[in-house]
């Protein structure tokens, strides 16, 4: 069953590397959301990498595909961020700040996250896509 997905930085990389399960999930998703935070992480990596110009060019082609949409934080996102921050802190399980923003967007919009980062498992209300890889 094809579902809309929110992608994390590591799954964009997996897609470019041609990982079969990731490519299939990207191809079958009717809509792929890319959080602004993921775009910033990718561009930061391009800025310090040895193939920055080429990576930026490939990314620009990727981000302008018709099924892609940039997911922007809003004031409502900040409420989800604060709630998740409190929840994770109360259990003594903080996650990286950028990933907390991504999680807040995912919870806000209730669209499954596609990521390899295990710390997202600490947020039970966060919908996830698994591929077995």
Image (cartoon, grey):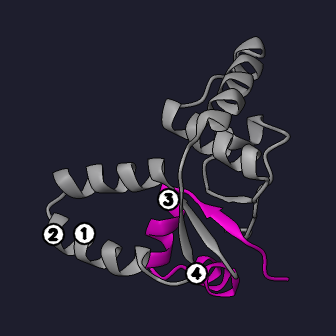
Q: What is the distance, in whole Å, between disc 4 and disc 2 at their CAs? A: 24 Å
Circle 2 residues within 10 Å: few <14, some 14–19, many ≥20? few
Towards the viewer: 97 or 66: 66
> Which label's residue is closer to the chain start, 2 or 3?
3
- Disc 2 to disc 3: CB gap under 8 Å: no
Place residue 4 in its image quadrant: bottom right
Sequence-wise, the earlier of marks 4 and 1 is 1
- Horizontal side, residue 113 vs residue 54: left or right: right
> Which is in the foreground here, disc 4 or disc 1?
4
Asked whether the beta carbons under mark 2 and mark 1 sit within 8 Å of each other, the answer is: yes
| Residue indicated by mark 1 | 56
Residue located at (52% from left, 31% from top): 96
Task: Name the residue rendered at 84%, 39% in the picture.
Answer: 124
Q: CA distance from mark 4 to mark 1?
A: 19 Å
Q: Residue at point 35% right, 56% down?
A: 42
Structural distance between the alpha carbons of marks 2 and 3: 19 Å
- Span shown in magenta: 1-29
Q: Secondary structure at mark 3?
A: helix
Of the two numbered discs 1 and 3 in the rendering, the one whose residue sits closer to the viewer: 1
Q: Position of residue 1 (x, y in %)?
A: 85, 83
In the displayed structure, 119 sits above or below 71; it is above
Mark 4, mark 2: which one is toward the viewer? Answer: 4
Instruction: Kindly report the distance in space between the C-alpha atoms of the residues bearing marks 1 and 3.
Output: 16 Å
**Which corner quadrant of the image does residue 132 belong to?**
bottom right
Of the numbered discs 1 and 3, the one sitting upstream in the chain is: 3
Identify the mark at residue 10; answer none if there is no mark.
Answer: 3
Badge 4 is on which residue?
67
To which residue does mark 2 refer? Answer: 53
- Helix or strand or loop: what does disc 1 sit on? helix
Kindly report the distance in space between the C-alpha atoms of the residues bearing marks 3 and 4.
Answer: 19 Å
């Amino acid at each position: 069953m094809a579902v809309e997905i929110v992608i994390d930085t590591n799954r964009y990389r997996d897609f470019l590397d041609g990982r079969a399960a990731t490519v299939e999930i990207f191809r079958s998703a009717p809509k792929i959301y890319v959080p602004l935070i993921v775009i910033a992480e990718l561009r930061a990596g391009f800025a310090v990498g040895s193939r920055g110009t080429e990576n930026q060019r490939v990314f620009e082609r990727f981000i302008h595909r018709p099924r892609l949409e940039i997911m922007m934080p809003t004031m409502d996102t900040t409420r989800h961020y604060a709630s998740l921050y409190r929840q994770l802190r109360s259990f003594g399980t903080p996650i990286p700040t950028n990933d907390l923003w991504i999680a807040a967007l995912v919870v806000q919009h209730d669209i499954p996250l596609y990521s390899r980062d295990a710390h997202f498992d600490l947020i039970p209300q966060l919908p996830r896509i698994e591929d077995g890889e």
